[in-house]
Amino acid sequence: MLEDTMGEFEKKLAEMGVSLPDAPAPAANYVPYVQVGDTLYVSGQIPKVGDTLVKGKLGDDMDTVSGAEAAKVCAIALLAQVKAACGGDLDKLKKVVKLTGFVNSTPDYDEQPMVVNGASDFMAEALGEAGRHSRSAVSAASLPFGVAVEIEGIFQIG
């Protein structure tokens, strides 16, 4: 019965075993998203599973596969913010325009793109063509609270 009230994107997420959490509250003095016209700018999301932050430094105490999983968690939080911005209707999402991924990594670590693929692959699988996007994947010497990854996004909604 609940599935009858779900939109297409949420049905696909359910098939993937993913249910969107409530949109995370900001960790400091900023808003979680800003809408300008049909463009939605979502603040950087950090990986949190339940009450636990996913911490680590790629190239030191975390491997690329674990980093990619943390990036997927960020992508799920991004979609939760988009859903909140769209009044609970994720199907108002038209396009993931761009993701910017920040990877907490050592100076010699060079697999940032593979880490951020965790978010990119998830968006493409969950949203199909609407999930294909432009992207940047950069290294950071550190990230808030020691998290492994932070990802922000730009979305087209309507």
Image (spheres, grey):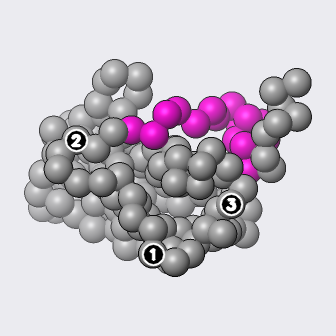
**Closer to us: mark 1 or mark 2?**
1
Q: Is residue 6 visible?
A: yes
Q: Amino acid at mark 2?
A: Ala
- What is the spatial separation of the Cα atoms under label 3 and label 1, in whole angstroms? 15 Å
Q: Amino acid at mark 3?
A: Lys
Q: Do the residues under discs 1 and 2 have CB atoms within 8 angstroms? A: no
Callout 1: few (<14), some (14-19), or many (20+) C-alpha neighbours within 10 Å?
Answer: few
- Quadrant housing the C terminus: bottom right
Q: Which numbered marker is on residue 27?
A: 2
Q: Tell me which residue sits at (28%, 44%) in the image.
A: 26
Name the foreground residue: 11 vs 147. 11
**Direction from residue 135 to residue 139 in the image, left or right:** left
Q: Which residue is mark 1?
A: 36
* Earlier sequence position, callout 3 versus callout 2: 2
Question: Closest to the observer: 92 or 96?
Answer: 92
Q: Which residues are magenta?
A: 9-24
Residue 128 highlighted magenta (yes or no): no
Earlier residue among tags 1 and 2: 2
Q: How many numbered marks appear?
A: 3
Question: Disc 3, disc 1: CB below 8 Å?
Answer: no
Quadrant of the frame with the N terminus: top right
- Could you tell me the amino acid type at mark 1? Val
* 130 relative to 52, above or below: below
Mark 3 surroundings: few (<14), some (14-19) or many (≥20) residues within 10 A:
some
Which residue does the image show at 27% across and 67% down from the upper left? Answer: 138
Residue 117, percent from left and from top: 49, 58
| Residue 98 visible (yes or no) | no
Where is mark 3, residue-wise?
92
11 in the magenta segment: yes
Residue 89 locus on image (x, y percent): 68, 49
Q: Secondary structure at mark 2?
A: loop
For mark 3, give the secondary structure. helix
